[in-house]
Every structure is written in structure tokens, then in C-alpha cells.
Image: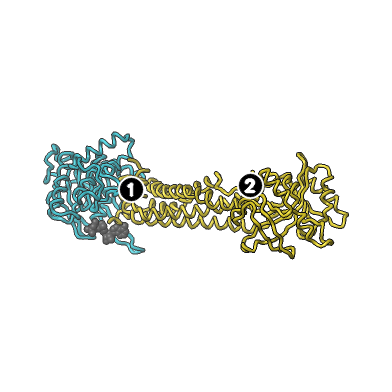
Amino acid sequence: MNLPLLAARNVLRNKVRTGLTVLGVAVALLAFMTLRTVLSAWTQAEEFSQKDRMAVRSKISWVVLLPKKYVQEVKDMAGVQAVTWANWFGGRDPKHKQEFFANLAVDPESALQVYDEFIVSAEQKQAWVGDRQGAIVGDVLARKMGWKLGSKVTLTGGVYPFDMEFNISAIYTATRRGADRNQFMFHWAYLNEKLSSERQNRVGWLIVRTKPGVVSAEMSKRIDDHFKSSGMPTLSQSELELNRSFLAAFTAILTAINVVSIVILAIMALILGNTIAMGVRERTGEYGVLRAIGFLPRHVLAFIVGESLVVGIMGGGLALLLGYPLINMGMGRWLEENMGGLFPVFGITTATATAAMVLAVVLAAIAAAWPAWRASQLKVVDALRRVG
Amino acid sequence: MSDAQAEGKAADEAAKNPPPYRTQPESPAIVSLVGVGKTFFRGKEPVKVLDGLDLDVPEGSFEALMGPSGSGKSTLLNLIAGLDRPTRGKITVAGTDLTNASDRTLAKWRSQNIGFIFQAYNLMPVLTALQNVELPLLLTSLGGAERKKRAQTALRVVGLEDRMHHYPRQLSGGQEQRVAIARAIVNDPKIIVADEPTGDLDRQSADDILTLLEKLNKELKKTIFMVTHDPAASERASVQRRLDKGRLK
Ligand SMILES: Nc1ncnc2c1ncn2[C@@H]1O[C@H](COP(=O)(O)OP(=O)(O)OP(=O)(O)O)[C@@H](O)[C@H]1O
Ligand SMILES: [Mg+2]
């Protein structure tokens, strides 16, 4: 027998109350871990962007198109390994009006060169390149829309005022996390031939793959300088920069998430503090007996804080136990597949798990501090009068 | 009353009620109160509970204290047990001057010199009888095995060796009080203070407890100071005292 045992036994005394408190602590920590995971996944997105790839668009806006001849001009520049281009079609499948997905007109051969994280079998690639109406789609998108190889799909135009018909001729997966498996890509030539002659041969943006060792900031400057004095200046940004500027737009949300997680922790401390205070009030007489026997105020203090720590640790343990399957397997898998660009790896990091556990312990100590201090400072005779 | 008179009175009483085992009737007082007063404050209003009280309890006696409710019996008991300090006067117990001792000193002193028995048995409900009895020993440097052995011995003294692993809720009131007594003697204190130890018990259980206290007094030579409302309990003690309006009679 020892004092920690007594503290632990006291925790289990009112099983319903302790159970509910542990659950409350666990739910609060779970919410905290979820928010933290959103933050860490978001910041990690940066690391998953391809550092040797950059987008070149019109300096004015994404929606202003560039002349197709820019492709060849960039390809001829030093440090460039490959160039491809894309136009945003912005179409929707009338059978799935609610589903938003990227559908792009691309150049098949060069696109697969530049986006080498997309995996597609040789036959399917052959089929797609060989079929003017062929489309390649991500496996996640295909599953969601119920498309199979050979499916016929019509997209109603959004940016362009006409519908287009496609055959699903290839389905790709990806080698790495963070790759978007929700895209729909088809032949740029097929789109181009549908346009009136004055709107033909213009591209939405270029995607440039640099040679190893090329500094992307220097490369983008060289490209932009090259087109500076032409009628249509460009803006080049690496994928990393693009992601960064995208995240910057969300700083307010990130701050809000931070604030909310602090509020959640405060609520957790209050729940815990309340339970501890209730227990202390009921057991004042027992503390009086302990003090009479010769235990010191610091024993009573340690005893009550110890009780709170046990509850905090149980809550933290439960949160981790529930958190891994819930956040990593459930929410995480869904987000990685559907919002892979934003959340390439959505899972509890060691840092988050550690933070949750440490906070459970620290907050448990803080929550118990006041009731424990009060109880320890009570005069023995006053505590004893509260017996029975 | 002067100190000399007080001592004289104590000696007289000791002579009147010589505990049977004692060879020297004039053994020194183990509890000595001189001119002790205690005033509580209810808000700003002072409540004088004890007033100029003198008391000598010779070592080895078994004393009962009676008196009306609110007369200050528990207050007096708490002062003797070093749970509280007097407003006036001087208290010496077991050779230690408690009058101005610090809380810390008192706590250590209590753990070595006093065994407590309360009306509501005051056991930890989450601990077994054995663990409850072991509790005071946690403050000593004794190892786990030795603590357990001593707790078992104490439980044997109170006749509960077959209930060691029972929890308080599995025991009768009388048995719970016996566990509390085992807890009070496990440290081998010189003095046992009991505040209405039979107050919550039926006649039979109360008699058993009183028989046990007698045994502790006679065989283990414990000095016992017991507050009670029960005349039958008071009869079992070797000295009867009455507290009324803050004064001892
Ligand atoms: N801590 C305290 N603060 C204020 N008043 C107190 C305190 N302790 C005791 N008193 C008062 O002192 C008086 C004596 O109390 P005490 O508990 O000593 O009486 P008692 O003789 O033991 O009574 P009972 O037989 O009912 O147990 C009472 O009026 C009580 O209200
Ligand atoms: Mg009383």
C-alpha cells in the first residue's frame, strides 16, 4: 500500500463521474488533435509540392490565355527539361451535377512526362494517346463517378460554350501522397479544333520541369524576363510558391483553428477541475483524518493533484486510442484521397500525440491546483468537523 | 488555581483511581493543561468555549469526559491531541509543550504520540481493513513488509485478523470501529483519544468497543482520553470528568 495507490483507488470511487470526466477530457483532446492535425497536414502540403516544377501564366490573371508559341520558346531555354500546357475546361458531368473536379485539356505525351508521379499502364497510356476523344482520370475520381475503362462521358462546358464527349481510356494512380487523384485530362488538340480560328492555339498555362540543379527562383525570373517586352508578359511560380501563396490566403482560418484549440483545452481543464473540486468537497473529512494521523498539507496536495493526473492520463490515453483509428484511418484517408492537394498526409504526428498527452497531464495538474491547495490549507479541526 | 494546587488535585485523583497495573501511584501526568482557554470567532464575534481550564491526566489512566452538547468536549480533546492550539494557557502532552508548536511539529508529534478514534469510523472506503490500518505507517521509514506485519498485529489485537481484506462497506459498524482502533494503535502511541467512539453503535457493539479500550488500557498501558455522551461508557473508564460552561468539574 502506498499513497499513489490510494489516489488511484479514489479515482475509481465514483465510476460514473470519473468515466464521464475521462470521456469529456478524451473528446476535448480528440478535437484538439484533429485541429492540430489539420494544421500540420496543411503546413506539410508544402513539403509535398514538386520543387522542380513551375507554372507559367499570364501576368494579368489565370484566366488570360497565353499564345501557344510560348511553349516552344520556353522549351528552347537553358535549364528546361520538359514543358507541357493545359487549358481549364471547367466542365461538369450532367449526371453528377454536384461533383466538382478539375478537367483539363492537356498534351498527352508531354503531360505524362512532366507529371511523372501519375502511374498508368503502358496499354492504357497507348489507348489514351491514340484516341482523340480519350480521357485519363484519377482512380479516386473514377470510383466516385462510377467510371470504368470504356465508359462514355459527356461534360457540359463551363468556360467554353459547348459540350464534349469522351471515352475513358485510362485510369491513373499516383506514386506519392499529395498527388491529385481527382483529375480528368483529355487531348488539348480535341478542344482546340472545336474553337473558332481566332480563339485557337492559346493555352491556359505552361507547366515547366527544370533540369536537376536549376534554382527555381532564377528560372522563373529568366522566363518572365524573356516575355517581359512581348505583348503578353508572364508570371512564373514554382509549385512550392503556389502552395505557399494559397496557404497565405488561409492564415485567418489557421489563426481561428489555433484559438479554437486553446478554447477546447480551457473547457477540458474546467471539466476536470469541476470533478476534482466535487470529489474534494465530499472527502474533506477524510483529508481531515489523514491530517490528524500526521499527514502534511503537501501530502493532501499531492494526493489530490495525483488523482487529477490519473484522470488526465486516462483521458489522454483514451483520446490517443480513439484518435488513431478515427483521424488517421477514417478522416485522414478520406481527406488524402479527396483533398490530396491540401492534405497530402493527414494523420496524427508524433508531435501532436505528444502535445496532447503532455497537455492532458499539465492541464490536469493546473485544474487540480486550486481545489488541492484549498484542501491542503484547511485547518485539521475544521476538516474533521465535516465528517459524516 | 495555582500550578501547585493543580498538581495536588491530579495526584489526589490518581490515588483515588489507581489503575491496577500501575506500581507507582504518583506517576507523572502525561497530559497537563494549565489555565487553558479557547476562543473561536464566529465572524467577528468571539465565542469563548474553554476558559481557564486546568487538567492533569496521569500516564496510564482511562478517562471519560462528559458534558452537554456544545460544552467544548471535542475542543478540549483536539487541544490535548495537538490538532489545535489554545488561545491562552499552556499544554504539555507526553513531554512536549504543544502551546506554540508549529503545524509541522504538531503533525509529526501526533503521528508518534497519538492514536485517534472518531465517532464516524473514518476509514478510507477504497482501502481494505489492512490497508487502512497501515496508513499511519506510511509516514514512517518502515518497509512494506514490516508495515504489513505491524498492521496485521494491530488487527489481531482488535480481533479482526479474519477480516483483513474486507473493505469498510463489508464490515459492521462495530467491526469498522475496531479497524479504526487498530489504526489508532498501529504506531504504538502513548495516548489514545476517542471522540464518542460508541456514539453510532448499538449497545452490544458499544460494549465490545469499551471492553477493547479497557484491554488497550490495561494490557498495552495506553493512556485513554474518551469523550462520551453515554453514562454506561463513562462508567467503564477509571476517571470520570464533566465539562460544563467551559470549566471542568
Ligand atoms: N472551528 C470552530 N469555529 C467556530 N466555532 C467552533 C469551532 N469549533 C467549535 N466551535 C464551537 O465551540 C463550541 C464547542 O464545540 P465542541 O465541538 O467542542 O462541543 P462538544 O462539547 O464536542 O459538543 P458535542 O457533544 O455536540 O460534540 C460550540 O458552540 C461550537 O459551535
Ligand atoms: Mg463533540
Asked whether the beta carbons under mark 1 and mark 2 sit within 8 Å of each other, the answer is: no
Taking depth in this image into account, of B165 and A144 the one nearest to the observer is: A144
Q: Which residue is mark 1?
A: A291
Q: Which corner quadrant of the image does residue A165 belong to?
A: bottom right
Instruction: Answer with mark 1 or mark 2, whichever residue precedes in sequence.
Output: 2
Taking depth in this image into account, of B89 and A103 the one nearest to the observer is: A103
| Residue A321 rendering spot, x and y as whole percentages | 46, 47
What hue does chain A carry in this figure? yellow
In the image, A67: left or right of A124? right
Pointer 2 chain: A
What hue does chain B carry in this figure? cyan
The answer to whether any part of residue A252 appears in the image is yes
| Residue A271 rendering spot, x and y as whole percentages | 44, 57
Q: Which disc number belongs to residue A173? A: 2
| Residue A70 rendering spot, x and y as whole percentages | 83, 52
Q: Which disc number belongs to residue A251? A: none
Q: Amino acid at mark 1?
A: Arg
The single residue placed furthest to the right in the displayed view is A229
